[in-house]
Image (cartoon, rainbow, N blue to C red):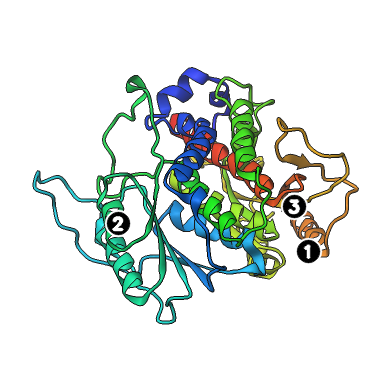
Amino acid sequence: MLDDTLLDDPAALQRADRDRALLALAGSGARVRTALRLADTAGLDRLRPDGRPRAVLVAGHGSALTAGEILAALAGNAALITPLPPTEAVAPRADRAGAPPAFTTGLGWQLPGWAGPLDLLVVSSADGGEPGLVSLAEQAYARGCAIVVTAPAGSPLAEAALQVRALPLPYVTSVLPEDEAPAGPSAEPDLPAEDPAALWSHLTPLLALAQKIGITQLPYDALPAVADLLDATAVRCRPDAAAYTNPAKGLAARLAGTVPLLWAEGPIAGAVADRFAAQLAERAGRPALAGPLPQVLTAHRGMFTGQLGAGADPDDFFRDRVDEPDPLHLQVLLLRHVPGAPGGAPDETDGPAEVPEDDAGPRSFGVTRAHRLAAAHEVRLTEYASTRPDPLHALADLLALTDFAAVYLGLAAAQS
């Protein structure tokens, strides 16, 4: 059982946050600004594309693939966006110092057989040391693909970008003060935890590129405005903000002791739900099931009629509260993007709002049926919606909230 009073103890949160995840998330807005500036310096602003590519393939792992999925959600049917995950893994070689190599250095990627001169390959890496991505870039060069590489300057992948005539874009790393550097050994040295704000270092140059080549119809100032939204969320979700005013802490408290079902209406919310499920596993060690409406109503129906549904009563009077741990129960979190909802345009400092159960706003049949299913089985359903008209800004709103919530849930659980 989570002791939610820990969420209102900034000192305890700071002690538990050994890898400074909260500080990294708070710097997401600065990363977006830096990435935009460095991308222009690298030549993106001088790019004069000759038409749009037939397909955009986004290769990488972790948040790099998430960035590709987000681009696909934003592009919709306007372009074919294909994330390329690794297809194989071999035992990586140890370096000369004998340090255990990262598991990712043994990953391999394969270019689809149909990829060719009409297509664009985007390779993105936070480390830049994966030989498999270097090999993939060489495959794409041999087939005549256009290539863009996002990697730290001076890394093997960044050097390979010059050899394959790719457009090199810099990856913006987290810069923590010396006294704020992550401390403590990793439980799995070859599988280190990913920087929670790495997504924005992958996503920002990718979206700037997509905007330049006409894959997305983003306003010219959409990306700088994202940085402002992320800053505003960092202020709302700061560690010293009380749980009743901090939406991320409130969401973390709601999810404690539950098996979350992350349901999403629309592609924007769907990308956020998938990301939230991954962050709950990574940061809070909690399983979660994510899926889009209306498919989840049939795919997750059995969860409501099983042991995690209303049959498992956490308030059973006869349960031994000393020897028996609190039982897990379901919690549905419904994420939506509702542009133009009543209430007017949201202020920059506003974030996604929790929608009251008796809200009279318009709902699709899928959302209505989701509420009925949860109510029929006495499962709590919490709904969060962003009303921002721009899809990218709505996505940034929901992503920032859920990223902070995953970190807070993990920190509070570690101290319980």
Placement of the N terminus among the 4 image quadrants: top right
* Residue assigned mark 2: 162
* Residue assigned mark 3: 378
Q: Which of the pair 113/177 is nearer the observer?
A: 113
Instruction: Report the side of 133 relative to 408 (left or right).
Output: left
Q: CA distance from mark 3 to mark 1?
A: 18 Å
Q: CA distance from mark 2 to mark 3?
A: 59 Å
Q: Residue at x 31, y 74 (%)?
A: 142
Q: Residue at x 57, y 46 (%)?
A: 327
Dot 3 falls on a residue whose secondary structure is loop
Q: Do callouts 2 and 3 mark residues in contact (Cβ within 8 Å)?
A: no
* Residue assigned mark 1: 366
Vertical order, 237 against 399 (above or below)? above
Instruction: Report the side of 320 relative to 351 (left or right).
Output: left
Vertical order, 303 against 354 (above or below)? below
Extreme-bottom residue of the structure: 113
Image coordinates for residue 400, horizontal then vertical, percent? 59, 40
